């Protein structure tokens, strides 16, 4: 097909305006717009738009990709979500089997699996710290949220880890502050959050010694719920007296920010 026979589409015009056409196709488009003033006007308009976008956002192209778009982190979050749904499916199968064959004695499948010893220590410490400090009125934290930068730097130094103080306002939780606590293997950090009704949630963090990541685990005791996990250099437990689904949403948002 020669140049005169070639049909020029709007796609060709856009590609020409963006400067991505090969020489032969570009020559065909140039011949077309010379004979079609409206097409030439469209191309000129699109080029002005491109230039305006480059002026406004051209610097973004030179910036490194944010951590949340890292391939390693995306793969890790996908693995975590996949594991969560697989556990839910397995639990559903167990519940159906128990209901059909074991009757009342099948209630034991509802009990969360016992954590490993190190994880159990983390959960016990996190729940105990929550019980002690979440009910405090005058001194619920050592360092208030108004000194957030100091709090983060102080606890990062004491745990020998670079810590992030998650922003959970999108989940309806405001940072109250935090404190340094003793743990079984060394220091621990506790961040406290509060919603509009006065319910408090605490995030308990200790350094991870093995550095092996785990997906979310769940524990409950005396009306307290907890989700706990290990992520690269830290182990965390989110504790609160909230419905399990609600606490899971908060834990997911916390995990994303800490990663």
Image (tube, rainbow, N blue to C red):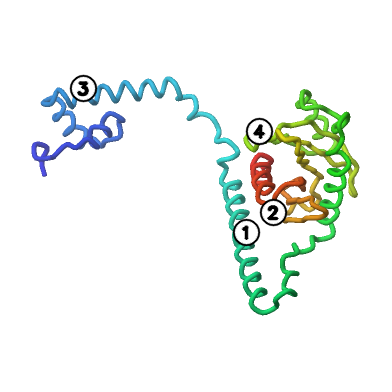
Discs 1/3, front: 1
Quadrant placement of the N terminus:
top left
**Neighbours of disc 2 within 10 Å: few (<14), some (14-19), many (20+):** many
Q: Earlier in the sequence, mark 1 or mark 3?
A: 3
Tag 1 near tag 2, CB within 8 Å: yes
| Residue at mark 3 to residue at mark 4: CA–CA distance | 48 Å
* Cα–Cα gap, marks 4 and 2: 22 Å
Q: How crowded is mark 1: few (under 14 residues within 10 Å), some or many (20 or more)?
A: some
Report which residue position mark 1 lands on: 83
Q: Which of 102 and 47 is in front in this view?
A: 102
- Mark before the other along the chain sequence, 3 or 2: 3
- Residue designated by label 4: 169
Measured as percent of width and height from the top left, residue 174 is found at 71, 32
Q: Mark 2 points at which residue?
A: 216
Q: How many marks?
A: 4
x and y percentages locating residue 225 in the rendered image: 76, 51
Is 135 displayed left or right of 4 in the figure? right
Element at label 2: loop
Q: Please tell me which of labels 1 and 4 falls first in the chain.
A: 1
The reply to whether the C-beta atoms of the residues labelled 3 and 4 are less than 8 Å apart is: no
Q: In which quarter of the image is residue 175?
A: top right
Q: Position of residue 169 (x, y in %)?
A: 66, 33
- Marks 1 and 4 sit apart, C-alpha to C-alpha, by 27 Å
Question: Which mark's residue is nearer the viewer, 4 or 2?
Answer: 4
Determine which of the numbered discs, if any, sits on residue 41 in the image. Answer: 3
Quarter-of-image position of residue 144: top right
């Amino acid at each position: 097909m020669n140049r005169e026979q070639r049909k020029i589409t709007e796609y060709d015009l856009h590609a020409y305006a963006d400067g991505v056409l090969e020489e032969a196709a570009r020559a065909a488009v140039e011949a077309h717009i010379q004979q079609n003033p409206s097409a030439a006007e469209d191309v000129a308009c699109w080029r002005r738009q491109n230039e305006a976008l480059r002026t406004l956002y051209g610097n973004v192209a030179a910036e490194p990709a944010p951590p949340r778009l890292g391939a390693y982190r995306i793969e890790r979050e996908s693995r975590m979500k996949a594991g969560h749904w697989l556990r839910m499916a397995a639990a559903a199968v167990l519940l159906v089997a128990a209901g059909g064959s074991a009757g009342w004695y099948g209630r034991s499948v509802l009990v969360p699996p016992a954590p490993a010893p190190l994880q159990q220590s983390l959960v016990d410490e996190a729940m105990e710290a929550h019980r002690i400090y979440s009910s405090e009125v005058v001194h619920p934290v050592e360092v208030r949220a108004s000194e957030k930068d100091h709090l983060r730097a102080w606890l990062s130094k004491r745990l020998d880890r670079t810590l992030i103080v998650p922003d959970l306002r999108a989940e309806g939780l405001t940072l109250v502050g935090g404190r340094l606590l003793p743990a079984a293997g060394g220091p621990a950090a506790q961040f406290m959050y509060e919603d509009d009704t006065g319910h408090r949630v605490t995030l308990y963090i200790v350094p991870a010694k093995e550095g092996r990541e785990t997906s979310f685990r769940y524990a409950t005791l005396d009306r307290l719920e907890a989700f706990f996990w290990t992520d690269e250099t830290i182990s965390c437990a989110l504790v609160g007296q909230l419905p399990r689904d609600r606490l899971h949403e908060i834990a997911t948002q916390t995990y994303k920010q800490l990663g």
